[in-house]
Image: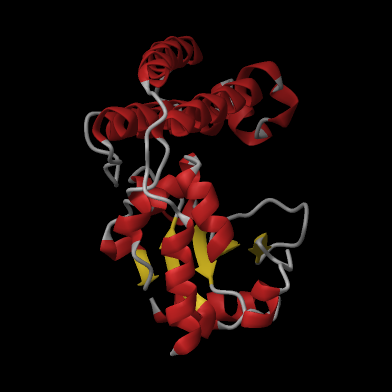
Amino acid sequence: MEEVIDRVTTLLGSRRIGWEDVVLLAEAGSTMHGVGVGEQDDLDLVIVRVEPFEELVTGSQRDQSVMIRTQPEGARSGPGDVDLQCYSLRRFAQLVTAGNPTLLNTMFVPSYFRLHDSFPLEELRERVDRHRAGQAYLGYMGQQISKWRDKPGMGRRELIDEFGFDTKYAYHAIRLGLQGHEYLTTGRITLPIPEPHRSRLEELRTGGITEARALEWAGEVEAELSRVATEARPEALPPLAPLVTAFYRSWYEE
């Protein structure tokens, strides 16, 4: 953990963001989902920071959402690399409560995948709009399927050469559908992904499932996700602003 925090601190320093402003640091990649491929994986992290007071009161948009990477812009991350998606607290809260699938995962990451946590995640979970989340999951899943099937030039050449299709896009599409269905029907996301889905997704990602069967599986998952997303209705939720405002006030007063 110390090595990871040292690398994160260095990356943040490159954008003049201090570690003392961090309120959440959590893993967000395949290892957290339980379907990593060991030393071949990079390290995906989500970090949430509280902006300096001046930046907040002036409404500055600097670094509200920024990707900070060990690889240069345009280069693909590889084994041992770090991809750090950094959000301001206000932007993070807005995206989570709007049902952003990637950030909803951080609401349910087990403690051993949270390297730092000082924000009331439970209270934020109570403010998520499930209706919007359902639409977001459908949209994200559709994007992954499109990249997999409709835009083969976007695929990972090495996977296409080895397996005949981009198994990582296929894996992400189906994973999103499964997690979206779980969230909409239970209000939670189980991480790492439980069996039997975990083993099947790992098999898919490593080329053990044919593309024809993967497409069939994706169609089944997407249809079921669409069903439960259609059934989700807008809810009367506690307001977000008082929660975030109170946290900012207590943070600056300390």
Q: Residue furthest left?
A: 195
Residue 140: percent from left, percent from top: 55, 30
At which x and y percent is residue 139? 56, 26
Colouring chosen for the image of the structure: secondary structure
Q: Quadrant of residue 146?
A: top right
- Establish if 56 lies above or below 138: below
Q: Nearer the viewer, residue 38 or 35?
A: 35
- Residue 230 placement, left or right of 46: left
Residue in the image at 67% along x and 30% along y: 155
Residue 251, percent across and down? 46, 81
Q: Residue at x 66, y 64 (%)?
A: 68
Q: Quadrant of residue 111?
A: bottom left
Please, which residue is most extreme toward the bottom here? 254
The reply, left or right, for residue 2 in relation to residue 112 is right
Residue drawn at x 37%, y 73% as measured from the top left: 118
Near-viewer residue (209 or 144): 144
Is 87 situated left or right of 206 in this image? Answer: right
Residue 69 seen anywhere in this rendered image of the structure: yes
Q: Seen in the image, is 19 located left or right of residue 209?
A: right
Query: How many numbered discs sit on the rendered protein?
Result: 0
The quarter of the image holding the N terminus is: bottom left
Q: Residue at x 58, y 28 (%)?
A: 144
Query: Which quadrant holds the C terminus?
Result: bottom left
Please indicate, yes or no, whether residue 31 appears anywhere in the rendered image: no
Q: Is residue 107 above or below residue 88?
A: above
Would you place residue 5 above or below residue 153 in this image? Answer: below
Q: Position of residue 215 (x, y in %)?
A: 48, 13
